[in-house]
Image (cartoon, grey):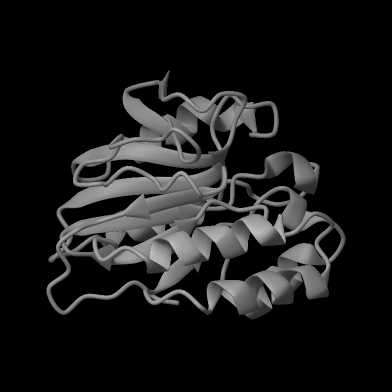
Amino acid sequence: WYDETEKAVEALNARDDIDFVLHGGDLSDFGLKKEFMWQRDILNRLRVPYVCLLGNHDCQGTGEAVFEKIFGPSDFAFTAADVRFVCLNTNAMEYDYSHPVPDFDFLEHEYGSFAPPARRTIFAMHVRPYDFQFNNNVAKVFEHYVVRFPQPLCCIFGQGAKDAPCQWLRLRFVRHGRGWTRALPHAPAASPESTWTWACLQLPLPQTKAPV
């Protein structure tokens, strides 16, 4: 899907209403270093900052370690305008329950350190709760953590069986991809050229940038 990434980057660069790009994961097929590097080289052509989520395919072999060397931690957060984006590794099945996925210590830290200018929250992940790849033994605990955050707006995820928005617990889950239109507050429609792992978000960003 490298050609799709190239088309997506070209389409995104043609727009002037995007502040940053969130890639929903599965940058690779087999977790190989060369796959991540190919994707990195293409994504680096973007005219705006971008961040990447860890997908289940990215966990193959030593993929997670390579991903983190190139794109950064698999659990991370950043603030854009007044929205805190909490980005999570939820690919539990790839770890055979040997690691805390999702990482509740990370969520607890983010909750405890939540501070201005952030006042609202969006959660992003590759695999949503109640997908067979999520650790559904802790799905209700996950909800408990998520709904405690200030003004949770929605959750977005990269993998799913349908392109349409779906409901999960008390938060709206939105799959970013083809046909995705204005599902998030202040978000423009996704480009027809975008692949199923993309979300294009627009927020007012006074002196604020998402990390690359």
| In the image: residue 38, left or right of residue 81 | right
| In the image: residue 116, left or right of residue 128 | left
Residue shown at 75%/39% (left/top)? 93
Rendered view: 42 above or below 54: below
The one nearer the camera, 201 or 101, is 201
Q: Is residue 97 visible?
A: no
Residue shown at 69%/33% (left/top)? 133
Rendered view: 145 above or below 37: above
Q: Where is residue 41 in the image (x, y as percent from the top left)?
A: 63, 79
Q: Quadrant of the N terminus?
A: bottom right
Residue shown at 78%/46% (left/top)? 94
The one nearer the camera, 207 or 112, is 207
Q: In which quarter of the image is the C terminus?
A: bottom left
Residue shown at 70%/61% (left/top)? 2
The one nearer the camera, 72 or 49, is 49
- The image shows a total of numbered marks equal to 0
| In the image: residue 133, left or right of residue 180 | right
Rendering quarter of residue 87? bottom left
Q: Where is residue 196 in the image (x, y as percent from the top left)?
A: 57, 42
| In the image: residue 180, left or right of residue 196 | left
Q: Is residue 146 visible?
A: yes
Rendering quarter of residue 39? bottom right
Rendered view: 187 above or below 28: above
Q: Position of residue 195 (x, y in %)?
A: 56, 47
Q: Position of residue 97 (x, y in %)?
A: 75, 42
